[in-house]
Image (cartoon, rainbow, N blue to C red):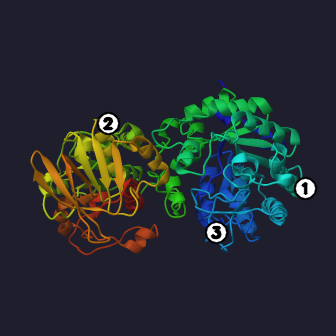
Amino acid sequence: MRADPLLTPLTVKHLTFKNRIMLSSHEPAYAEDGMPKDTYRAYHVERAKAGVALTMTAGSATVSTDSPPAFNNILLYKDECVPWLKALADECHEHGTAVMIQMTHLGRRTRWDKGDWLPSLSATHMREPAHRASPKIVEDWDIQRIIKDFADAAERVKAAGLDGLELEAYGHLLDQFWTPLTNELTGPYGGSFDNRLRFIFDVLSAIRERVGDKFLVGVRFSADERLAGGIDAQTGLEIASRFQTSGLVDFLNIIRGHIETDSGLADVIPVQGMANAPYLDFVSAVRSRTGMPTFHAAKISDVATARYAIESGKMDMVGMTRAHIADPHIVRKIMSGQEDRIRPCVGATYCLDRIYQGGMALCIHNPATGRELTMPNDITPAAIAKRIVIVGAGPGGLEAARVAAERGHKVVVFEAADEAGGQIRLTARSPRRKEMLSIIAWRMAECERLGVEFRFNTWAESADVLAESPDCVIIATGGFPDTPPLATGDDLVVSTWDILSGDVAPGKTVLLFDDAGDHAALQAAEMIVEHGGKVEIITPDRTFSPEIMGLNLVPYIRSLQGDHAAFTVAQRLESVERSGNGLTAAIGSDYREFERRVEVDQVVVNCGTKPLDELYFELKPHARNQGAVDYVALTQGRPQDVCHNTNGTFTLYRIGDAVSSRNTHAAIYDALRLMKDM
């Protein structure tokens, strides 16, 4: 039998990687006080235990105090990072996984009002759009100081026992020197191409002097900025060649594009609905030009594509980072012939969008990621089998069914519709969001494997549930569209659900009031425009669509920006009345006395959901816990043990939107932390 290309070893200088799958550098924002403590270590160790060959810790670990973290990065300029990194490396090494770290000076890609409130700096004075930093132009003493900071940080990394490091050169200080778009310097570090590259080679020389030859040093860089006047592909190939001939660089990690705007970043890190693995041929061209070990990651989310990338020689190591956020056990499942059981990355990029808004990385449908200390990826069997009844087969209900069945319980699921999915089915009606269906498909396949019983087309009544003699009942019935508190006209508006489901045809002139700020509003807006309508989207918030976040917002703006859609912030729908054959909407503001009236033929509202919770309240008096949840135990990952009714024969819980309007991750997390100890 031919060896799996993904499982073949790779040797780079003195170090042999046991397979070709890596976690590319990324910052999950789990650091505490700038250090990779227990949560950070547990995240990487979980993936090491499952067999990944290389885990590249830290996106943008900072080397200087005037490079303050933009999103909870590791502080490599502090000596105290060494023991924490050593603990991480030692534990990963126990499982045969190599450990490296990405380090950088952010330059202008940060803010002056973070960390020690030092001015940001760059080779340009121009403001960085994403972080709004207006940097000072770097001085000679800054250059020498920062070169030493890089060398000091590299020495700390080696002292911690890591196997190597990677310099980041896309959108950060190193490439802010070399691209003509951001280098205004004169003298030895400005002007000519050679001068602009001088800084990174000075940094590399200083690092190599400190760490020696038996330590891997690589560069992750954009070999084509795809910006007029910037580094183009031909120039990028020349830079790669110079790295090769310098003898200072052991591997290249290639990206394509620029990241100083949300739009550029979304092309570098493609999100849901964008092309998978878009840069394989470009990476192959760099590898062919240099002959150097070449790494790459950009929405390579499935094993088949990763295998092709290695087998065809397009790269030497394939990064499957978001895929490992969704399922940390990919390599183990490949090795055991269980590829069909890999939890799929659906490209939602909930992980990265949260980081860029100051949160920690979480997977939209694996709530154990980032919570490895309290939440399991592998479910352990229960000592006693129970009978579990679940009402609702949306993402939360299916997760509850999957986990309960993994525990060895007998599980029956009631679902009013003719198929599983709940609101996921609705959101997946937009072509860009169809990957969300994999959240449902994976759980249905797992439930089928585990013998879960489904009763579709069944509206469960309390008598139906009680007839099952359950030990535990989970209400996962979700919610139904809420409406705004209008002075008049409640009966004249339709919901975004009505538009997305096709129950109501889109109008030609539409006012869309978005009070929830989530995907449903912009999905409905896209559908209205696609059907030839014009839409104004208004929100009482000071920004539009705050729940969608930066990367996922990009495709919507590209789709809607133009003559057929307009966005208005800080305005609120107050009433709707009939006006001839159309409608008149009265619009006000929370900020001052203000009113405008708009003539349209349709008003669409997006206000989240109200819980569909009648069944829960009918069952509550019969339950041993009467629906109560021990929140302390829940948040600490401990079992529930609440009893308010000694005559009760079952425990009762509700999850997801059956509790309150939240999101897919919340529903699945509710299910996991309740059922893992059931």
| Quadrant in the rendering for residue 119 | bottom right
- In the rendered image, which residue does mark 3 sit on? 112
Picture layout, residue 605 above or below residue 63: above
Residue tagged 1: 209
Q: CA distance from mark 2 to mark 3?
A: 43 Å
Residue type, label 3: Trp
**In the picture, residue 81 is in which quadrant?**
bottom right
Q: Residue at x 48, y 36 (%)?
A: 340
Depth check: 473 or 573 in front?
A: 573
Query: What whole-number distance in Å separates the C-alpha atoms at marks 1 and 3?
Result: 32 Å
Helix, strand or loop at disc 2? helix
Where, quadrant-wise, is the C terminus in this rendering?
bottom left
Judging from the image, what secondary structure is the residue with disc 3 in? loop
| Element class at badge 1 | helix
The label nearer to you, 2 versus 1, is 2
The residue depicted at 75 percent of the width and 29 percent of the height is: 288
Residue 473 visible in the displayed image: no
* Residue corresponding to mark 2: 530
- Residue type, label 2: Glu
> Residue 87's x, y, as percent?
71, 63
Identify the mark nearer the N-term, 2 or 1. Answer: 1
**Residue 167 position within the rendered picture, expressed as x and y whole percent measured from the top left:** 74, 52
Task: Tell me where residue 210 appears, x and y as whole percent.
Answer: 88, 58
